[in-house]
Amino acid sequence: MEAELRTPVKLNAAIKQTLAGIRPINEDRRHKAQAHLDCLTKPLGSLGQLEAVAAQYVAWREQEPPRVAGKAVYVFAADHGITDEGVSAYPREVTQQMVGNFLNGGAAINVLARHTNSDIVVVDVGVDADFNGAAGLVHRKVRRGTRNFAREAAMSEAELNAALQVGIDLAAEAAAQGRTLIALGEMGIGNTSAATAITAALTGRPVAELTGRGTGVDDQRRASKSQIIDQALRFHFGDYSATRPDALDVLRCVGGLEIAAIAGMVLGAAAHRIAVVIDGFICTAGAAVACSIAPNAGGAIFAGHLSQEPGHRALLDHMQLRSLVQLDMRLGEGSGAVLTFPLIEAAVRIYNEMATFESAGVSEANEA
């Protein structure tokens, strides 16, 4: 198979406007926030990553005193044509069934959202099923799943634009609702294959190093999955490790509708200065595409956790992100991201409420 001729992906005017509105993180505010943290009644840097989280949140939100409001997790659901190649241990209909589980409140993400007092927003952006106007579901279906990217592009240019716009529109709604902190999650049988393909194309790393077990495939099926993804990338891009194809073209050819919507929500959230916690491998793939086309969006992002998927570490390294926790999870749904809400809230409360050496009348360390 030969790689198809490449043409740049054209974005619609609304998406271009969103990109133009993304400002970089305010480094002056970050330095001032860290200076405040250094004055608190503790040894310098003793709260470790919590201090970095607080400084980033303050600098990104540009609000004094900083606050956390309207916490929510957005779970984007879609199906994948690549499942026709036998890359998953579960059948495609599990995507639809799990969306029903989300709506009924019985999934892990429902439990964790309740635990962290967070709203949950479930979005059908591309499930291969008809939900008949199911209550509680955000109906934004672009199409009933992507095409099989082993044989053709997963999405058309118009479909990619539409999926990106879903995320951008939901971010605008979140801003209007006063949300300052959101988490992103996903559900889609076959989406670790799409995320692996995106990761290999963006990082240039060999697919074999990046392919994990996904929903729990055995060694034989994992090897087959790796070969299928590698061949698909070569079909679309030729020697992808050398050419490093355009991120939007990668998303169009081998991505997923939910991954595109996640990328769009990262972009939209960044434009509205909302802080975003990304979940595991699949969400990070969407965020990586967003940051490839709008590097300033990186200031909005907190990496929730480091999953068991080998490609996730490669992507976080590529984006120069450090996860807040490592719990050996690989569930998805936004579960690892929501678990870090209390950590971010704790960091903000430390910034706001902890006494300084001066206000507490505590002596500071002697200078060397």
Image: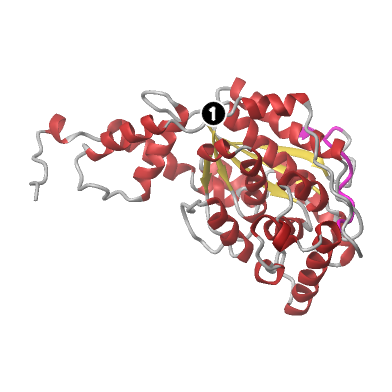
Q: Position of residue 101 (x, y in %)?
A: 74, 48
Q: Is residue 286 visible?
A: yes
- Identify the image quadrant of the N terminus: bottom right
The one of 203 and 243 positioned closer to us in this rendering: 243
Which amino acid is tagged 1? Arg
Drawn side of residue 44 relative to residue 140, left or right: left
The magenta stretch spans which residues? 133-149
Query: On the image, which quarter does residue 266 sit in?
Result: top right
Residue name at image x 51 percent, y 48 percent: 339
Crowd band around label 1 with a 10 angstrom C-alpha radius: few (<14), some (14–19), many (20+): some
What residue is pinned by disc 1? 23
Q: Position of residue 343 (x, y in %)?
A: 42, 45
What is the basis of the colouring in this image?
secondary structure
Q: Position of residue 159 (x, y in %)?
A: 85, 38
The one of 78 and 99 positioned closer to us in this rendering: 78
Please tell me whether the stretch drawn in magenta is mainly helix, strand or loop: loop
Query: On the image, which quarter does residue 344 sit in?
Result: top left
Residue name at image x 69 percent, y 30 percent: 168
Q: How many marks?
A: 1
Compared to 153, does 221 lie above or below? Answer: below
Q: Position of residue 235 (x, y in %)?
A: 86, 61
Drawn side of residue 91 relative to residue 29, left or right: right
Considering every residue shown, the one lying at the far bottom of the view is 220
Q: Is residue 10 magenta?
A: no
Q: Is residue 89 visible?
A: no
The one of 365 and 26 positioned closer to us in this rendering: 26
Drawn side of residue 203 relative to residue 306, left or right: right
Residue name at image x 87 percent, y 58 percent: 3
In what element is the residue under mark 1? loop
